Amino acid sequence: MRLPSRADQTLDLGEQGCGQLVMELMLAMRALAPGQTLLVTTYDPAAAGDIAAWCRMTGNTLRQILPDSSGNQFLLQKGPNCRC
Amino acid sequence: MLNNFCVNLTRSTDDPDRATVAMVVANAAVASGKQTMVFLSSEGVRLAVKGIADQISEEGFQPMTTLLQNFLAAGGSVWVCSPCFKKRGHTEGDLIEGASIVGGAKLVEFLSNDGTGVSY
């Protein structure tokens, strides 16, 4: 299944982490409609935990974690009651 | 899940590392949908004085001015301890845009209303 190629939007966060990472997530997700997807690329070692927690708190869904050659990719889906 | 989140910050230019990390966490909280308030007390109140945040830029982090601007733009609040501010000779005219001077009762009310927080 090639979900990343079907993402509605992509976001490359590089090595940004912690508050800067979730701030960028919030801004990107605000621009999407419920049900749309966001493919996030990040190289921060804490990103997996932070993104999962952020999704739980804001009513979004972490659909898939896709390891790539040098970092991780995360496919998020905007929830119907997104709090961001 | 608790929705009010307070970051109590007692440092500014006297400990730029700690002050920066506090604002990074505040940004994480507000971007996570929490009603987030940074409570500046003791030396932390200097961050709310015009021109002071410009002096703080820690390696590996966004400059303090950017952190503050992003936090306020995302809907966060900056509250400044009234007696701490006055003790240091400042007045309301010294405040950065978006900050407000409050007393202890406001902090207690915020935390008592399903609030939690972290202190730096």
Image (cartoon, coloured by chain):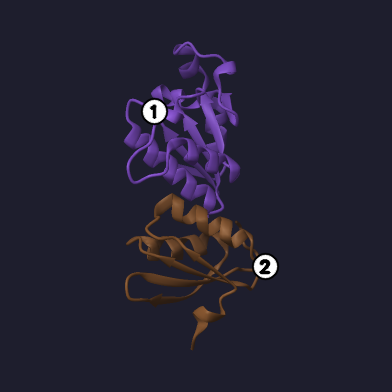
Chain colours: A brown, B purple
Task: Please say if B32 is above or below A71.
Answer: above
Q: Name the quadrant of the C terminus of chain A.
A: bottom right
Image position, residue A63 (x, y; %): 50, 76
Chain to which mark 2 belongs = A
- Tell me residue A26's x, y (percent): 55, 57
Q: Residue at x 47, y 29 (%)?
A: B40
Side (left or right) of B49 relative to A34: left
**Are discs 2 and 1 less than 8 Å apart at CB?**
no
Q: Is residue B6 left or right of residue B73?
A: left
Badge 1 local density, few (<14 within 10 Å), some, or many (20+)? many
Give the residue displayed 57% in from the left and 56% down from the top. Answer: A27
Which residue occupies the foreground of this view, A37 or B45?
A37
What type is the residue that disc 2 sits on?
Answer: Ala
Identify the element where label 2 is drawn. Answer: loop
Q: Amino acid at mark 1?
A: Ser
Q: Look at the image and tell me whether residue B24 can be seen.
A: yes
Do the residues at discs 2 and 1 belong to one chain? no
> On the image, numbered disc 1 is attached to which residue?
B12
Question: CA–CA distance between discs 2 and 1?
Answer: 39 Å
Residue A52 placement: quadrant? bottom left
Give the chain of mark 1: B
- To which residue does mark 2 refer? A33
